Image (tube, rainbow, N blue to C red):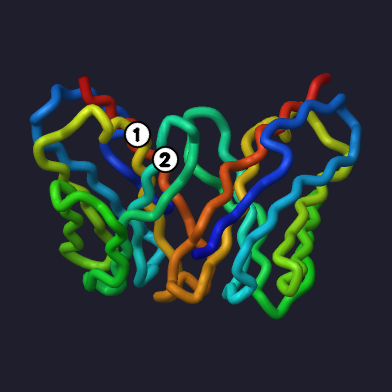
Amino acid sequence: KQEVTQIPAALSVPEGENLVLNCSFTDSAIYNLQWFRQDPGKGLTSLLLIQSSQREQTSGRLNASLDKSSGRSTLYIAASQPGDSATYLCAVYNQGGKLIFGQGTELSVKP
Amino acid sequence: DTAVSQTPKYLVTQMGNDKSIKCEQNLGHDTMYWYKQDSKKFLKIMFSYNNKELIINETVPNRFSPKSPDKAHLNLHINSLELGDSAVYFCASGRQALNTGELFFGEGSRLTVL
């Protein structure tokens, strides 16, 4: 059974810092991995999608990596801003056709 | 302009009532989903439909009945509501069956059962 774990559960950093969010999954037989952002009381916004054959994806200040064999992904945020404060969710599409979520990392960027 | 829209956004009701949540997507996707986010913010899949056909049905009480009149709509009907049904329900859509593409989520419907 696929399980997705995100560390840390919460993170508080001063503005301007670079930071890394971690995601691990137990079953490496995945189609892809997706990082989402969720603001309080809002839906999920897709940030980056990495196919199983890819190693990383970049969008602006965000860079996501995927090491399928070790069951790990990281989301790197450069030069963090207060507007980056949100919960970041990692999710994997497994071969059963389901998107399995981690419990998220709650990020707070202090001005 | 909203890609995946859900109504209502908030729903407060008494135990034992029956309620529905509607979802529509204008992205032309073939696959739609319902997810439940509990009080600990954990998101779990409930159902998935591809071209109006049910393809994923997780261990969900049969009080929950999804209905897809066409591939742009997936509604969720809940009978005999219980306190534990209180959660945020998210609708999502994707480009392909088996979730091999990117998923797009609605803003959620917060259900509170009193």
Mark number, residue B16: none
Q: CB under 8 Å between callouts 1 and 2?
A: yes
* Residue A92 falls in image quadrant: bottom right
Q: Residue at x 64, y 42 (%)?
A: A88
* Residue matched to label 1: B87
Q: CA distance from mark 1 to mark 2?
A: 6 Å
**Residue toward you, B45 or B74:** B45
- The crowd level at tag 2 (other Cα within 10 Å; few <14, some 14-19, many 20+) is some
Q: Judging from the image, what secondary structure is the residue with disc 2 in?
A: strand
Identify which amino acid the numbered label 1 is placed on.
Ala
**Residue toward you, A37 or A70:** A70
Q: Residue at x 65, y 73 (%)?
A: A51
Position of residue B74 relative to residue B101, above or below, is: above
* Residue matched to label 2: B37
The quarter of the rendered structure image containing the C terminus of chain A is top right
Position of residue A42 relative to residue A111, above or below, is: below
Q: Is residue B103 left or right of residue A110?
A: left
Identify which amino acid the numbered label 2 is placed on.
Gln
Q: Residue at x 59, y 76 (%)?
A: A29
Q: Is residue B23 left or right of residue B27?
A: left
- The crowd level at tag 1 (other Cα within 10 Å; few <14, some 14-19, many 20+) is some
Position of residue A21 relative to residue A4, above or below, is: above
Q: Closer to the N terminus: mark 1 or mark 2?
A: 2
